[in-house]
């Protein structure tokens, strides 16, 4: 390890308690994807800590979701040339009031709380890596630190900004939680999140049943057809996770709504799959009914390229120098790393501290991995400057 590498790694170790304090602070802020005020409060907390480390964040205001934030650390040639993007999201899946019921707590090297692993620990890690380089230097390539606020709902407002930040990057390290195995993520499925509705014809269920057209019956037929698209051999899964509809028990239902989750690997033609879904939703399964898509979010698959394989090797070598080993894993979850990869950047995901049971009340983060994973990212940044 060079003197400069050692200095950065030692700096990160020395700031472990500062990392934990910031982690507790932002976990104890409700920041669900639809809670703009909460996501922006997380951003303010991160901005305040980064400012003390001489990194001023540029804010990209968004009207309905949390503002995006960009911090930059110059490299050997200033801010010119290819950069390393440290990526993360500030939103969680948990509604307002969750923190009051189960705030941050830590016990035996494990932290718990809403979003502690997915991905507030990763935000803290990326922030401190950036501050270490800002104070000590040594990064040949400039760093971009980019935080979004709507990733959990497929990044409807931040998508184009993320693509812009990833364009021209030498490497993208997305600090989603490291797998429970300790591994990083080299492949992810793409996803469609589709809200849809069915309109029928209301009627009295006893007096003039024949004049009605049940939206619920049509919805049921559509659910059966949509679930029939699941093909586990090809890696495709479909799930209608929520359904609402009807007016009363004695009324032929005039309307119904559903929400569909679809996952597919990069080997599947996503557009063809999307076309089949559209056909099912719009089909007149029951005469005098009609269906339509009302809202949609899309995640792109993360597909490992030759350049991404080289990035994985850099990270693996960094980890080995620190005394631990990692492999690349494929996961059915989706993330903004798919966007970064689609921009042509070498991309590695799951570089954050190790965690698990995300999106549940039992979500946890192994805080004993916080410093080591930060050091591995830092050594990878050094390596990219030598490649």
Image (cartoon, rainbow, N blue to C red):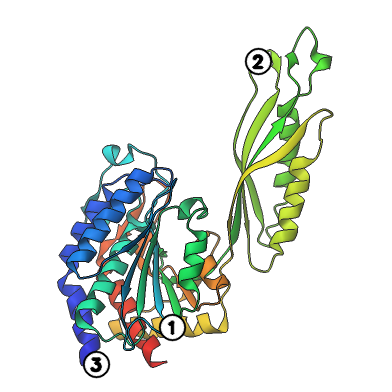
- Residue at image mark 2: 249
Sequence-wise first label, 3 or 2: 3
Q: Quadrant of the C terminus?
A: bottom left
The image position of residue 132, as x and y in percent, is 23, 76
Q: Is residue 78 above or below residue 232?
A: below
Q: Quadrant of the N terminus?
A: bottom left
- Residue at image mark 3: 2
Sequence-wise first label, 1 or 3: 3
Residue 248 versus residue 71: which sits nearer the camera? 71
Residue at 37% x, 89% y is 385
How far apart, in angstroms, are the residues tagged by discs 3 and 2?
73 Å
How far apart, in angstroms, are the residues tagged by discs 1 and 2?
62 Å
| Mark toward the viewer: 1 or 3 | 1
Q: Is residue 62 above or below residue 136?
A: above
Secondary structure, mark 2, is loop
- Quick check: can you spot residue 30? yes
Residue 157 versus residue 130: which sits nearer the camera? 157
Secondary structure, mark 3, is loop
Q: Residue furthest top?
A: 207
Task: Name the side, left or right, on which 41 lies relative to 152.
Answer: left
- Residue at image mark 1: 82
Residue at 50% x, 74% y is 167
Bin the neighbour count of mark 1 within 10 Å (Cα to Cα): few under 14, some 14-19, many 20 and up.
Answer: some
Residue 333 versus residue 56: which sits nearer the camera? 56
Residue at 57% x, 80% y is 305
């Amino acid at each position: 390890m060079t003197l400069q590498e050692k200095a950065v790694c030692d700096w990160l170790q020395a700031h472990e308690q500062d990392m934990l304090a910031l982690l507790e602070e932002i976990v104890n802020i409700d920041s669900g994807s639809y809670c703009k005020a909460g996501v922006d409060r997380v951003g303010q907390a991160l901005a305040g800590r980064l400012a003390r480390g001489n990194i001023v964040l540029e804010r990209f205001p968004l009207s309905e979701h949390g503002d995006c934030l960009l911090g930059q650390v110059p490299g050997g040639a200033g801010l010119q040339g290819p950069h390393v993007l440290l990526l993360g999201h500030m939103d969680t899946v948990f509604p307002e009031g969750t923190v009051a019921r189960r705030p941050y707590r830590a016990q035996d090297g494990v932290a718990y709380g809403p979003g502690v692993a997915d991905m507030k620990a990763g935000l803290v890690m990326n922030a401190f890596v950036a501050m270490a380089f800002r104070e000590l230097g040594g990064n040949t390539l400039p760093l971009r630190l980019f935080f979004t606020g709507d990733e959990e709902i497929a990044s409807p407002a931040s998508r184009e900004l993320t693509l812009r930040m990833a364009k021209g990057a030498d490497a993208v390290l997305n600090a989603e939680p490291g797998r429970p195995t300790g591994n990083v993520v080299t492949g992810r499925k793409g996803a469609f999140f589709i809200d849809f509705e069915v309109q029928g014809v209301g009627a009295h269920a006893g007096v003039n049943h024949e004049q009605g057209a049940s939206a619920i019956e049509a919805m049921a037929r559509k659910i059966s057809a949509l679930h029939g698209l699941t093909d586990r051999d090809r890696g495709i899964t479909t799930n209608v996770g929520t359904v609402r509809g009807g007016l009363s028990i004695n009324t032929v239902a005039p309307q119904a709504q559903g929400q569909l989750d679809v996952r597919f690997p990069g080997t599947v033609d996503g557009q063809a799959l999307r076309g089949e879904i559209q056909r099912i939703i719009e089909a007149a399964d029951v005469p005098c009914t009609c269906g339509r898509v009302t809202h949609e979010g899309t995640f792109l698959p993360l597909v490992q390229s030759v350049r991404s394989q080289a990035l994985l090797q850099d990270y693996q070598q960094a980890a080995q120098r620190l005394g631990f080993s990692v492999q690349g894993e494929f996961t059915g979850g989706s993330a903004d790393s798919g966007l970064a990869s689609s921009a042509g950047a070498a991309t590695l995901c799951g570089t954050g501290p190790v965690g698990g049971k995300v999106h549940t009340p039992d979500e946890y983060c192994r805080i004993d991995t916080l410093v080591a994973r930060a050091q591995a990212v830092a050594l990878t940044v050094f390596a990219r400057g030598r490649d």
